[in-house]
C-alpha cells in the first residue's frame, strides 16, 4: 500500500514551498524551460495531427473499399447485361405462320419442287416457345432436288425441323412428297 505520509515528508508540505526560490530558479533557466515547453507542445501537436491524419486515412480507406465494391458490382452487372444481349442475339430469328409458308415456298422454288397442297399452320404455345406445324404435299422431278430441299429446310437460318417425310415415285417418274415441318418461336 502507498504510504502518503512518507511521500509528503520527503517532498515537504506545499505550505513550506519557497515560491520566491522557485521563481528565481525559473527566471535563471527561462530559455531551457521555454524550449522544454515548446518541445512538449510540439510533440503533443504532432501526435494530435498524426492521430487526426490516421483517422482520416482510415475513413478514406473505408470509402475506397466501398467504391471498389460498387465498381465491382457495376462491372458484374454490365457483364451480365452484355451476356444477356449476346444470348438474345444468338437466338434464332422470329418467324410467323405467313413467313414460314413463304419461306417454304421460296425453298421449294429454289429446288424445283412444286407444292400441291398445304395444310394451314398450327401454332401451339409450349410455354417458353411456340411450335408451328405445317404439313404439305409436293412434287419433285428427281430425288436429288428433293434431298436438297429437305436439307435446305434443316439448315435454315430459322429454327426449322423436318418432323417427318414420305416420298414415293409415280409411274411418270415424278416423286410425291408428304412433309411435316415444325418451326420454333422462342418467346423473348
Image: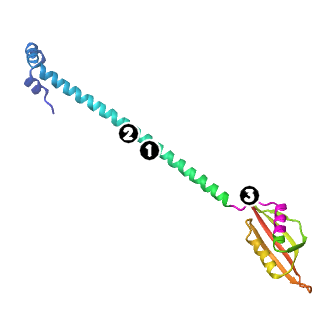
Residue 132, x across and y down, in percent: 81, 65
User: Is 41 placed left or right of 32 in the picture?
Assistant: right
Label 3 or label 2, whichever lies nearer to me, is 3
User: Is 6 placed left or right of 174 in the picture?
Assistant: left
How far is the residue under mark 1 from the one under mark 2? 11 Å
Residue with the mark numbered 2: 58
User: Is 78 placed left or right of 114 in the picture?
Assistant: left
Q: Is residue 160 above or below residue 60?
A: below
* Crowdedness near tag 2: few (<14), some (14–19) or many (≥20) residues, C-alpha within 10 Å: few
Q: Is residue 96 magenta?
A: yes
Asked which secondary structure carries label 2, the reply is: helix
Which disc is residue 1 wearing? none
Residue 141, x across and y down, in percent: 86, 80
Asked which secondary structure carries label 3, the reply is: loop
Residue 55 occupies quadrant = top left
Q: Is residue 153 magenta?
A: no
Q: Residue furthest bottom?
A: 171
- Is the residue under label 2 in contact with that under label 1 (CB below 8 Å)? no
How many numbered tags mark residues here?
A: 3
- Find the magenta span and give its range: 91-106
How far is the residue under mark 3 from the one under mark 2? 51 Å
Residue with the mark numbered 1: 65
Asked which secondary structure carries label 1, the reply is: helix
Q: Earlier in the sequence, mark 3 or mark 1?
A: 1
Name the residue at 84% across, 65% down: 101
Q: Name the one closer to the observer, 127 or 134.
A: 134
Residue 145, x across and y down, in percent: 81, 78
How far is the residue under mark 3 from the one under mark 1? 41 Å
Q: Quadrant of the C terminus?
A: bottom right
Q: Earlier in the sequence, mark 3 or mark 2?
A: 2
Residue with the mark numbered 3: 187
Amino acid at each position: 500500500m502507498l504510504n502518503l505520509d512518507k511521500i509528503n515528508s520527503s517532498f515537504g508540505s506545499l505550505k513550506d514551498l519557497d515560491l520566491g526560490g522557485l521563481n528565481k530558479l525559473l527566471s535563471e533557466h527561462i530559455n531551457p524551460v521555454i524550449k522544454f515547453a515548446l518541445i512538449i507542445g510540439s510533440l503533443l501537436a504532432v501526435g494530435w495531427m498524426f492521430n487526426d491524419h490516421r483517422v482520416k486515412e482510415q475513413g478514406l480507406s473505408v470509402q475506397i473499399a466501398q467504391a471498389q465494391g460498387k465498381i465491382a458490382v457495376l462491372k458484374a452487372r454490365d457483364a451480365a447485361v452484355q451476356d444477356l444481349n449476346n444470348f438474345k442475339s444468338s437466338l434464332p430469328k422470329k418467324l410467323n405462320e405467313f413467313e414460314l409458308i413463304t419461306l417454304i415456298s421460296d425453298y421449294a422454288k429454289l429446288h424445283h419442287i412444286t407444292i400441291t397442297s398445304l395444310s394451314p399452320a398450327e401454332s401451339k404455345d409450349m410455354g417458353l416457345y411456340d411450335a408451328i406445324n405445317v404439313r404439305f404435299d409436293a412434287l419433285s422431278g428427281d430425288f436429288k432436288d428433293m434431298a436438297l430441299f429437305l436439307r435446305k429446310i434443316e439448315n435454315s437460318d430459322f429454327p426449322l425441323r423436318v418432323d417427318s417425310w414420305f416420298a414415293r415415285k409415280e409411274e411418270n417418274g415424278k416423286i410425291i412428297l408428304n412433309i411435316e415441318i415444325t418451326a420454333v418461336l422462342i418467346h423473348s
